[in-house]
Amino acid sequence: MKKIFTSFLVAAMALTMNAQVISSPTDVEGVSVGLTAETMSPNALYVVGLDENSGNPTLWKTATGEIAELSESTTVFYYEYTYGQKDEWQYQYDWETWEIIDSVLVQVDDYDNKLDSTLMSYEAAFTGSFLDVNDLGMIVGEYGIEGNAVAILANASDIQDYTMLAAGESETEASSAYAISADGSVIAGFYYDAVDFANSAVKACIWTEGGSVRTDLPWPTNEEIGVEIEGTEARWISADGKIIGGFAQTFAFGDWILLFWELQEDGTYKPNTLVSQYYTENYDPALANKYMKFEPQGFSSNGEWATLMIQEQFDMFDWDAVWPDPQAARLNLKTGVMEVLTLEADPDSFFAPDAPTLYSVADNGTAVGFTGGMMTVRKGFVWPAGSSSLVAVKDIFTNEKYFDYTEMDGEESLSYITPDAKKVLGMNHRIVDEEWLTSSFIAELPETLAIENVGSAKAEVPAVCYDLMGNRVDALRSGFMIVGGKKVLVK
């Protein structure tokens, strides 16, 4: 595997960490509580997430401080059988008004005519999530009764007046709207083509014309990406709606791998095959630049960057094989150049050696997220564009009311960075008066956020490159070459 070291002409400069938290909802002694923030509009005027206590989809209007929750309930009817036997049940309701149309049709194999039943009812709560919001305050997500959620479109002016997006022939199929373009003309998401999730396929789709028209996104073929797939999801969209990012689920192992679609001149979307240059589901040491895990975690607003969780290939059938640790990476979708972030297993390091989670990436490639997980404390970070190092949240934000705690009583993460890389959305978890509280905040990054000396950044590239005369070559060679429009030194 060839490695290249991309030279960056960046002046050495010290980190002047004077960033401050500039906004937070529901302050309690200076600390915001109750909102688990998921994402934010690029203009930082709207934040969507979940209320920590109720679990309801929640909107935070940062300019006014207003907090709004989407909350509903309805009566659900079902049959309960005598003789102590209860069968599976379904309910039918009007998808426009959420009113019950009919009681549940129950099927009990051969016992349908042998058991007495009583019509029962109970109060069922609606559940769901707000998943994206644009500068216009248009919100998309999922909402429905007890897990049977459907894709919705709401507006910050009145989140209770939401619209359910177009469904297919089955009125009870589950769906989710994950992303919306800057002007709201294209919504990206997915749906299950049957009520029975275990026997249904998940299919990526888009909604247009205000959500009234749903169109499936095409699946790539085995020949196009080198692997058979059984499902797709669309979870991100560029501001202009021309790039849609998501997953493809492989048939053999169920891996979720990178997939993105590009808008064509005829108005349709076509899957990009870049993943075929990096992913393989079959171990082969002769294959260069191949990974057995290639899962996307975020896409930039301009459609040029994707952040990933990757894992180098290994022989899973060799009992003596050492399984490589997962790593984080950012991939330039235009050039195909990927930068891999490796954390050393140093017990004195601030960051845990766990693979970082890269929640969000700006238009210049700057990424944010956290390290740690189930067994280690989460520690937020910024991975500046062009850098091979992470910058810890604790070294960026000096506001002690949010970050004055030890590893034992607090942690934090960053979940969103604006396209211009100037503001971030984050969450802070800490113990206050013996209670575990969640705080959400928006903060400005310092203009000097960079690293003192970039040095060299590790990158791996597909076999598309040019010599200094502009001639395309089939493989990297030692010396200077042109890769992705940049002059690089291959060693």
Image (cartoon, rainbow, N blue to C red):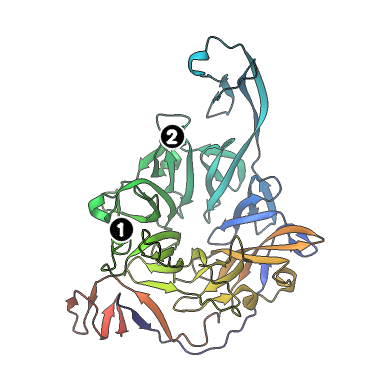
Give residue 231's position: percent from left, percent from top.
37, 45
Q: Residue at x 21, y 82 (%)?
A: 467
Q: Residue at x 52, y 13 (%)?
A: 112
Q: How many marks?
A: 2
Query: Which element carries disc 2, helix, strand or loop?
Result: loop
Give residue 309's position: percent from left, percent from top.
45, 63
Q: CA distance from mark 1 to mark 2?
A: 37 Å
* Viewer-closest of 483 and 410: 410
Location of the C terminus by quadrant is: bottom left
Q: Is residue 166 visible?
A: no
Q: Residue at x 56, y 57 (%)?
A: 39
The residue tagged 2 is 167
Dot 1 or dot 2, earlier in sequence: 2
Residue furthest bottom in the image: 12
Crowding around mark 1 (Cα neighbors within 10 Å: few <14, some 14 to 19, many 20+) is: some
The residue tagged 1 is 282
Location of the N terminus by quadrant is: bottom left
Give residue 237's position: percent from left, percent from top.
42, 55
Q: Is residue 62 above or below residue 149?
A: below
Query: Which element carries disc 1, helix, strand or loop?
Result: loop
